[in-house]
Image: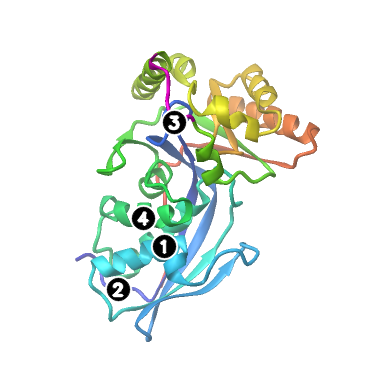
Amino acid sequence: MGKSALNEVRVFSPATVANVACGFDVLGFAIERPGDEIVARLSSKPGLRIAKITGDDGRLPLDPSKNTAGVAALGLLRHLARPDVGVELEIHKKMPFGSGLGSSAASAVGGAFVVNHLLGSPLTRQQLLPFVVAGEAAADGAWHADNVAPCLLGGITLIRSNAELDVMDVPIPDRLWAAVVHPDIVVLTKVAREIMPRHVQLETSTQQSGNLGGLLCGFFKSDYGLIGRSLHDLIAEPHRQRLIPEFYRAKRAAMEAGALGFSISGAGPSVFALCEGEASARRAAEAVAAVFTAAQLKATPYVSRINPKGVHVVSES
């Protein structure tokens, strides 16, 4: 059943980039920053309680059954048949809402992971997947693991089947870096999903499949040229780009700065570029941020290696 129980645990739950252009709902990777911090401590009162939420401007519910972190943690406690245990959560939101960086996924993953660790880690990370997917689904109504899987497991993850939660790790090329830029607007996942086409032309589907296969081969072979040739989204990006001011100008700027490829992070409005090397990633981030700044939008850049750890313990007592 794992280690003995602790009294208090604090975890860091990182942001993620989902879809990764051609991998709609099936591909994602974790980055180093930003992320949420979640604290869990044992309580003498049975049940789960959210004691405090910071950084949310009062927008998130304290009721665990209506909160993504709470839903994930409650599902875990039910599975473990531990109605006797008392747990108190603190959620410290340190990433923007509606950003396309997996904010709700980070909370869901952090909620389940921190409670599991507090109770001695009876479940593996892989076994936590159903609870964290259910937690995120409470926020956006969709059952998909392309944010929660890399947040929970770290690295780059491929979801063969969201229904079966058949998830696997993808190798991370040594010199692969990400440049992620968040323009200060909100795009709700539900809205971004509603504008997606219900039907896709056969030719488009075939090319998108080729791009996804090529991107995966590029990751496995550390073939940066192949990664760049494959990093194209023919399904979501043409529709969602209109939700992001100056999207194509930002894309041109990233490519001119040397990025391998560029697209929308998750549902947006954050955008990302994959790059070979840190210097290239920093140039791309600076160029994209300058485009948004010129359009009178505050832009926050994040330059990061692919985060191999995912959610992890910061402190425990």
The picture places residue 61, in percent across and down from the top left corner, at 53, 68
Name the residue: 40% across, 43% down.
150
Q: Quadrant of residue 75?
A: bottom left
Task: Give neighbour class at mark 4: few <14, some 14-19, many 20+ (Cα, 10 Å).
Answer: many
Pair 1/3: label in front: 3
Task: Give neighbour class at mark 2: few <14, some 14-19, many 20+ (Cα, 10 Å).
Answer: some
The residue beneath circle 3 is 198
**Label located before the other in sequence (3 or 2):** 2
State the separation of the CA atoms marked 1 and 4.
12 Å
Task: Give neighbour class at mark 3: few <14, some 14-19, many 20+ (Cα, 10 Å).
Answer: few
Q: Is residue 277 visible?
A: no
State the separation of the CA atoms marked 3 and 2.
48 Å
The residue beneath circle 2 is 5
Pair 1/2: label in front: 1
**Which label number is shown at residue 111?**
1
State the separation of the CA atoms marked 4 and 3.
24 Å
Q: Is residue 258 visible?
A: yes
The quarter of the picture where the C terminus appears is bottom left
**Label located before the other in sequence (1 or 3):** 1
**Does 134 appear above or below 85?**
above
Pair 2/4: label in front: 4
State the separation of the CA atoms marked 1 and 2.
16 Å
For this view, does 174 lie left or right of residue 165? right
Q: Are marks 1 and 3 in contact (CB under 8 Å)?
A: no
The residue beneath circle 4 is 134
Residue type beneath disc 4 = Ala
Q: Which residues are magenta?
A: 197-202
